[in-house]
Image (tube, grey):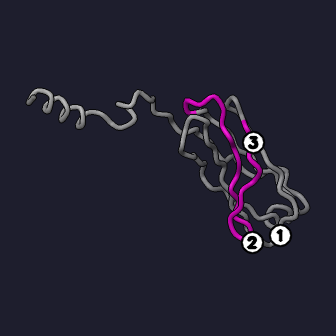
Amino acid sequence: MSRVLLLAAILLLVCTPLACSGTSTAHTATVKTLGAFEIYGDGATLKGELVNLGGSTKAEVWFRVKAPSGWDETTKQTLTAPGEFSYRLTNLDQQFTYTFEAWAKGDNSRDEGHGDPVSFNIADIIG
C-alpha cells in the first residue's frame, strides 16, 4: 500500500495534466505583423505572415485594428501552410494613427498568438 502511495505521489510531481492524459500539448501558431502597404486615398492593405502552424493542420489568421471607435477585428482567413496574408481597410480617417496586430489560432490550440503592433497614419505617408 505504501508503495502505491509513493508511486502516486511521484506521478503527481512529475506529470502535468496534459502529459499524463495521453493528449499531446499543442503549440500556438506563430505570426508576424509585416506592416501597412498600398496606402493611398482612404485605404491601406495590412499584411501579416503565418510563420508556422504550431503543430496544427490549419490556422485562422486575422488582424486586430485600433480605429477611432476602438479595437476591432477583421474577417478571419484560414491558412493550411505558412505564408503571407492581407486585409484591405477602407474609409480610413486621414488624421488618425491606426495600430494593428496580426493574430493566429491553430486548430489544435486553445491559445491565440499575435505579432508585434504596427502603427501608421495616412496623412503622414501621403503628404
Decide which of tag 1 and tag 2 comes sooner along the chain: 2
Q: Residue at x 60, y 52 (%)?
A: 116
Q: Using the numbered discs, state the Cα–Cα distance from disc 3 to disc 2 in whole angstroms.
A: 24 Å
Element carrying mark 3: strand
The label number, if any, that marks residue 68 in the structure image? 2
Image check: 12 left or right of 62? left
The front one of 112 and 119 is 112
Decide which of 89, 120 is in the foreground and name it: 89
Q: Position of residue 7 (x, y in %)?
A: 17, 29
The earlier-in-sequence mark between 3 and 1 is 3
C-alpha gap between disc 3 and disc 1: 25 Å
Provide the residue designation for mark 1: 93
Q: Which residues are magenta?
A: 54-78
Q: Main secondary structure of the magenta part?
A: strand
Residue 88 part of the magenta segment: no
Q: x, y (%) of residue 108?
A: 56, 34
Q: Residue at x 60, y 48 (%)?
A: 115
The answer to whether residue 113 is above or below residue 20 is below
Residue found 23% across the figure and 37% down from its top: 13
Q: Amino acid at mark 1?
A: Asp
Which class describes the residues within 10 Å of circle 1: few (<14), some (14-19), or many (20+)? some
Look at the numbered discs 1 and 2 and tell me whether their residues touch, using CB distance below 8 Å.
Answer: yes
**In terms of image quadrants, where is residue 43?**
bottom right
